[in-house]
Amino acid sequence: MNISIKYLIIISIFMATFSGCKKGGGTPEPAISDTTKPAISVTKPIAGQVFVAGNTITFQATFSDNEKLKSYEISISKVATGGFILKNVPASVSFSYIRSSTSFSSGVKQEVISLSDIIIPANTATTIVTPGKYNFNVTCLDGSTNSTQTTIEININ
């Protein structure tokens, strides 16, 4: 009986060793995660470009990623500066714009976006768009949530 137990232990060890070595078994190798940020190449507007209230800002950019693009966002905001307020002058309003979370086609790695619907409000008798420097911000997110942002400074007169 003592020999039977020894054989049973040896067979159990043998089976445990080979069952862990079968093809495809064991610990899976970790997946390689995408850490490459997407790229943005803006061709319109150009840095320093001047716009007037009532004008349309044309936007054109190429977005690309090594895996896949997910979404982009555009925002325009006034560059903060100090100043003073004049009395009996029409109220000044800082122009701002947001186009948030616009999705790309599924699985696309590169896409050119052209927009011509970003309108700077026209001046009226009671309000004027605050002239000055504005940041035109473009952010891109890829399928792995890597993000890139680029800022172009434009002027509104």
Image: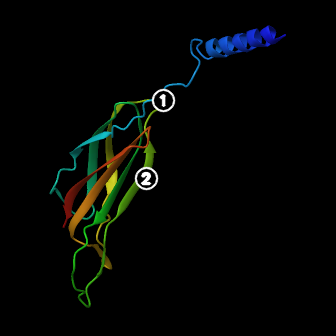
The residue at the point 15 percent across, 57 percent down is: 48
Q: CA distance from mark 1 to mark 2?
A: 34 Å
Kindly identify the amino acid type of the residue bearing the numbered disc 2: Ser
Residue 122 vs 20, above or below: the answer is: below
Label at residue 155: none
The crowding category of the residue bearing disc 2, from other C-alpha atoms within 10 Å (few below 14, some 14 to 19, many at least 20), is few
Q: Identify the residue under disc 1.
A: 30
Secondary structure under the numbered disc 2 in the rendered image: strand
Residue 156 vs 142, above or below: the answer is: below
Quarter of image, res 153:
bottom left
Residue 15 is situated, as x and y percent measured from the top left of the image, at: 68, 12
- Most foreground residue, 123 or 16: 16
> Nearer the viewer's eye, disc 1 or disc 2?
1
- Most foreground residue, 37 or 14: 14
Quarter of image, res 107:
top left
User: Dots 1 and 2: beta carbons under 8 Å?
Assistant: no
Kindly identify the amino acid type of the residue bearing the numbered disc 1: Pro
- Most foreground residue, 111 or 16: 16
